[in-house]
Image: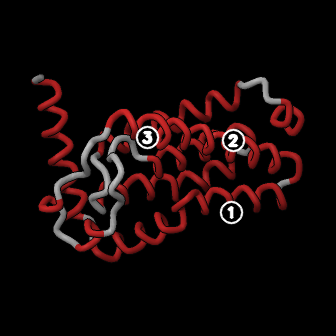
C-alpha cells in the first residue's frame, strides 16, 4: 500500500509540474503534434511516406510500424483500459483549459503513447534514420499527455512499455508480409 501511495505522490508532483511549468507556446506545439497523432493519423501518414519514398526499406518500416501500432492499440485500449478503469488526473491539478478537452475513458495506460512508441520502435530496425525522425514527435506526444492533464506519468510509462513490447513482438513474429519486405 505504501508503494502505491508513493507512486501516486510522484504522479501528482510530476503531473502538476508538467502542467504548470511547460510554457504556453510549447504546450500549443505539443497539442498540435498530439492532434496530428490522434487516431494514429500521424503514424499512418509517416508509413505512407516511408512506403512511397523509401523503397524496400521504407515498405518494411511502414509495415512494421503500422503492425506494431495495431498491436499496441489492441493491448492498451482494447484490454488494459478495460481492466484498469483508472480516473484521469484531477482537474484542479491542471492550471489551464486543456484539462477540459480530454476523453472520459480510463487513464491507464496512455494509448497515444503506446502507438507512438510502437511505431517508432518498430520502424527503427528497418530504417534507423526514419526511426530517429519519428522519435521526436513520439516523445512530444508522451509529454503532451501529461502536460494536458489527460494522463499521469505512470500511464505514459506503461503506454511506452506496451508500445516497445508491441514493436518487439511484431519484429519477431513469423509474419510473411513483414519477412518478405525486409
Q: Foreground: 108 or 140?
A: 108
Which residue is labeled 3 in the image?
A: 159
Position of 153 compared to 74: left or right?
left
Which residue is labeled 1 in the image?
A: 45
Residue 80 occupies which quadrant of the picture? top left
Residue 8 occupies which quadrant of the picture? top left
Circle 2 — which element?
helix
Q: Foreground: 69 or 77?
A: 77
Where residue 138 appears, as percent x and y from the top left, is 51, 53
Which residue is labeled 2 in the image?
A: 67
Q: Residue placed at 79% from the left, 29% from the top?
A: 175
Q: Mark 3 Cα within 10 Å, few/some/many (few <14, many 20+)?
A: many
Position of 116 compared to 64: left or right?
left
Where residue 144 appears, as percent x and y from the top left, is 37, 60
- Estimate the spatial distance between the alpha carbons at disc 3 and disc 1, rounded to whole Å: 21 Å
Position of 3 compared to 73: left or right?
left
Q: Residue placed at 78% from the left, 23% from the top?
A: 174
Query: How was the colour assigned to the protein in this rendering?
Result: secondary structure
Quadrant that contains the C terminus: top right
Above/below status of 10 relative to 176:
below
Where residue 86 appears, as percent x and y from the top left, is 27, 42
Above/below status of 14 relative to 125:
below
Residue 172 occupies which quadrant of the picture? top right
Q: Residue placed at 17% from the left, 61% from the top?
A: 91
Position of 21 compared to 180: left or right?
left
Q: Earlier in the sequence, mark 3 or mark 1?
A: 1
Q: Residue placed at 10% from the left, 24% from the top?
A: 2
Q: Earlier in the sequence, mark 1 or mark 2?
A: 1
Answer whether labels 1 and 2 touch (C-beta < 8 Å).
no
Quadrant that contains the N terminus: top left
Q: Mark 2 Cα within 10 Å, few/some/many (few <14, many 20+)?
A: many
Amino acid at each position: 500500500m505504501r508503494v502505491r501511495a508513493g507512486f501516486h505522490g510522484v504522479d501528482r508532483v510530476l503531473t502538476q509540474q508538467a502542467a504548470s511549468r511547460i510554457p504556453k507556446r510549447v504546450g500549443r506545439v505539443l497539442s498540435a503534434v498530439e492532434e496530428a497523432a490522434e487516431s494514429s493519423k500521424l503514424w499512418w501518414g509517416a508509413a505512407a511516406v516511408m512506403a512511397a519514398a523509401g523503397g524496400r526499406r521504407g515498405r518494411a518500416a511502414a509495415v512494421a510500424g503500422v503492425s506494431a501500432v495495431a498491436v499496441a492499440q489492441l493491448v492498451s485500449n482494447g484490454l488494459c483500459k478495460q481492466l484498469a478503469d483508472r480516473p484521469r488526473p484531477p482537474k484542479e491539478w491542471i492550471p489551464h483549459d486543456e484539462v477540459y478537452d480530454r476523453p472520459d475513458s480510463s487513464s491507464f495506460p496512455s494509448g497515444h503513447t503506446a502507438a507512438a512508441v510502437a511505431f517508432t520502435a518498430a520502424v527503427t530496425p528497418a530504417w534507423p534514420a526514419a526511426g530517429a525522425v519519428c522519435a521526436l514527435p513520439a516523445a512530444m506526444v508522451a509529454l503532451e499527455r501529461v502536460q494536458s492533464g489527460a494522463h499521469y506519468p505512470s500511464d505514459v510509462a506503461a503506454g511506452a512499455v506496451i508500445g516497445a513490447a508491441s514493436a518487439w513482438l511484431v519484429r519477431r513474429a513469423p509474419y510473411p508480409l513483414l519477412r518478405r519486405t525486409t
